[in-house]
Amino acid sequence: MLRPRPAIRTLPAYHPPLAGRDGLRLDFNENTIGCSPRVLKRLQGLTSEDLARYPERAPVEEKVADFLAIPSSALLLTNGVDEAIHLLCGTYLEAGDEALIVVPTYSMYRIYIMAAGAKVIGVAAGKDFQFPVGDVLNHLSPRTRLIAIANPNNPTGTVASHEDLGQIARSAPAAAVLVDEAYFEFYGQTLLPKRENLTNLFVVRTFSKVYGMAGLRIGVLVGDADQMRAVRLVSSPYNVNAVALACLPDALADQGYISGYVSEVKEARGRLERVFKSAGVRFWPSQANFVLARVASDKLGAASFVEHMRRRGILVRDRSADPACEGCVRITLGPRDHTDRLLASLQETIEELGIAQGASRS
């Protein structure tokens, strides 16, 4: 009988709750108003011949390299951040290897590591989800071959300092160190300049969040040119579709659209955090386009809060299953009008459920 590898048979299933997403979608950290008008115009100009050809990645990689001010040999366009993680696991991990992640964090790190047959070493975040650099260093071993760190982290919105990340990369020269900067634009700080001195450092970005192109599935993986040659051997030559490749240059060219959206999200983030603080709801200050808050009361769990918000047309994400996130929800931020709707519904839900009574403040 044909059976999958043992590593696959033991994988945890990841089923994002995508069905029935009617309402203001503040549950998946997407851009809540969509992509740049320039991208839509480019989409409308695509022809049947554009779709009939195999996608050519190299010319667009040159444009992305110019945008990032790095050589094109140091980057690879990928089918979203997920493929970048998968490629690194396929390039560097074997059965018996170890890979470190700091929990709670993005679920797919664990799944791709396990699929490669490696052992996941989960290091718990510190108090208030602070990055535990000392514990990460203490868990390094000769078997450590990958370290995956989201910065800013999902679902907490917290960050690790560049000094701590550099120390980890220098302390584990035989391990691939992946710094996932999916929420870079909302944070404004990047580790890209350090890649020239750290040949085991990889940085990944996505065009699914601030760029509003989650449906096109495109990201970029950056690393040492010699290491990237090895990663390219694992990658399909046609991993990014022609529609995404056609749209990406226009998305990059419209930085006015990006900066305007980022500005409104940061304003919304501050407004939401002030409401939580005033109401006595526990939350964690964020550097991303979302805020994590503990909304459960003695009588009601986070699922009740999510359902009450959904009835008001607002979708938020229950993160109670994540380590140390019991009773927590994650709320994505968007432009001012979306934030007005969110805060009105939030205040009604807080009062209706009484979730703030006795809650500790951040």
Image (cartoon, helix red, strand yellow):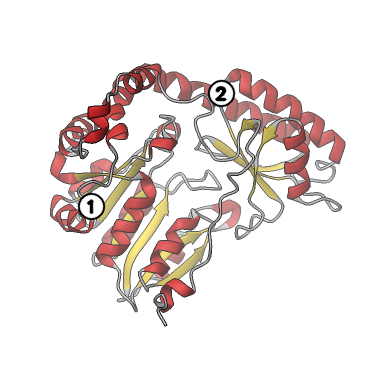
Quadrant for the N terminus, please. bottom left
**In the image, 42: left or right of 346?**
left
Task: Give the quarter of the image for residue 93.
Answer: bottom left
Q: Is residue 284 visible?
A: no
Above/below status of 117 relative to 284: below
Quarter of the image with the C terminus is top right
| Residue 125 shows up from this direction | yes
Disc 1/disc 2 C-alpha distance (Å): 40 Å
* Residue 117 vertical position relative to residue 74 in the rendered view, above or below: below
In the image, residue 151 lies at what x, y percent? 42, 46
Mark 2 nearby-residue class (10 Å; few <14, some 14–19, many ≥20): some
Residue at left 23%, top 33%?
A: 64
Pointer 2 residue? 267
Q: Amino acid at mark 2?
A: Glu
Q: Which residue is mark 1?
A: 236
Instruction: Name the kind of residue labelled 1 in the image.
Output: Ser
Residue at left offset 40%, top offset 21%:
36
Q: Residues within 10 Å of mark 1 (few under 14, many from 20)?
A: few
Query: Are the residues flagged by discs 1 and 2 in contact, CB closer than 8 Å?
Result: no
